[in-house]
Amino acid sequence: MRVGLPRMHREAGERRDFLPTFVAALDAAGAEQIVVERGYGSGMGIDESAYSAASSRLVLGDYDDCLTQDAVMQVRCPQEEHFERLRAGTILLSMMHYTTRPQRVRRLAEFGIRAISMDGLVDDTGRRLVENLAAVAGDGVDSAFKELAELYPDFHDPRRPPVRVTVLGSGAVGSYAVRAASRYGDPNLRDAMAARGVKGVEVRVVDHDLTGHESYMRSLLTTTDLLVDATQRLDSTSHVVPNEWLADMPGHAVLLDLSGDPYDFSVTPPIVKGIEGIPQGSLDQFVFRPDDPAYEALDARASTEHRRVSLSCHSWPGRNPRECMEVYCAQLEPFLDVLLNKPADEWDAGSTSLYERALARAELGRWLESSPA
């Protein structure tokens, strides 16, 4: 099987590419040819020569050369307007986020692309096998506390009350967010504050069964300095926190979106964020102050009347690209033998191989068959 590794061109801040060690793993797994886009790895300071040294089967090409291979691998899914450049039957391994990108799913199916969702590679209990959720929470919470430190009156004063953080969601991301928030998102800052006798952080976790109780939630928000959305919603068409509730929060409060769910008003009902009115961020811009034009650019169906400093990013781990790719490469390597050497039609969800079972479940056609109509 011939493999294409294109770069991601959506924004300057997106610098992630697979590492030379991953190219070596592709070679060892039996890739016939590995086509790497020119400039690959440059955003992480890796020279092309490091990739060439990793495999004698590597050739350099342009973006389209990479897309015409039997299998295409890229962390973030290519833009939908590029799907037509892939041949029907091409295996596309990327973060697909099927459940919150219905338009993407339709387009992939229309072009006959054998999509494999990296975020859908799970074990038999549903635990993700390719993830960097600790970095999602850690990088996001660290960034949010940096903003809060500038806004919170007397943040470094030992006489202030504890900082109060409310985390929505108690799953994996929520658990990591609790740990990060209890340390101000930065263990060094926590140590410095503790040494000065400054009161620490009180973290409160609110899960699904409580978020629907408006009076309770609004009372909680009056004393929330940092609100973190770490939810994994079964229904992404409904907000967890409507915009009007934000009026009850302190003026210095900060909102942090860790879920990464996008807005999509092209579908009915539309896909919306857990906290209504937060703009969709990127690696180029993930902090939005109340007067940011991004609020006005949102579809009018998302209310932005009540605003606080908000942080949102489609991929928090991408802020540290090399560390992120070290994690993803190590997690993906065990899948390569099945991916490259067994036809996708033969992948068996009942196989004795954990990795084959996971690939079968994450393949778009099988996912569509198992999803509710």
Image (tube, helix red, strand yellow):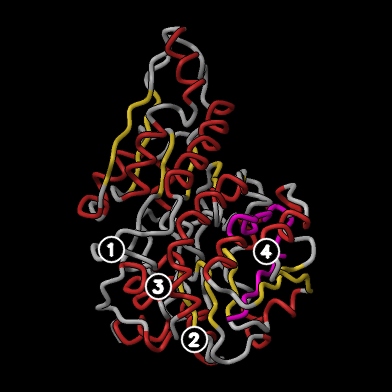
Quadrant occupied by the N terminus = bottom right
Verify CB contact (< 8 Å) between mark 1 and mark 2: no
SS of the residue under disc 2: helix
Q: Which residues are magenta?
A: 1-22
| Image quadrant in which the C terminus is located | bottom left
Asked if the residue under mark 4 is in contact with the one under mark 3, i.e. CB atoms within 8 Å, the reply is no
Label 1 neighbourhood size at 10 Å, few (<14), some (14-19), many (20+)?
few
Which type of secondary structure does the marked residue at label 4 adopt? loop
> Closer to the N terminus: mark 1 or mark 2?
2
- The kind of residue tagged 4 is Ser
Asked if the residue at tag 1 contacts the one at tag 3, i.e. Cβ–Cβ closer than 8 Å, the answer is no
Residue 37 against residue 170 in the figure, above or below: below
Q: Position of residue 258 (x, y in %)?
A: 46, 50
Disc marking residue 126? 1
Report the residue marked by disc 3: 99
Q: Is residue 298 left or right of residue 132?
A: right
Say which label, 3 or 4, has the lower sequence index: 4
* CA gap, disc 3 and disc 1: 15 Å
Q: x, y percentage for residue 306? A: 50, 49
**Cα gap from disc 3 to disc 4, whole angstroms:** 36 Å
Read off the residue under disc 4: 55
What residue do we see at 57% from left, 56% from top? 279
Q: Which mark is residue 236?
A: none
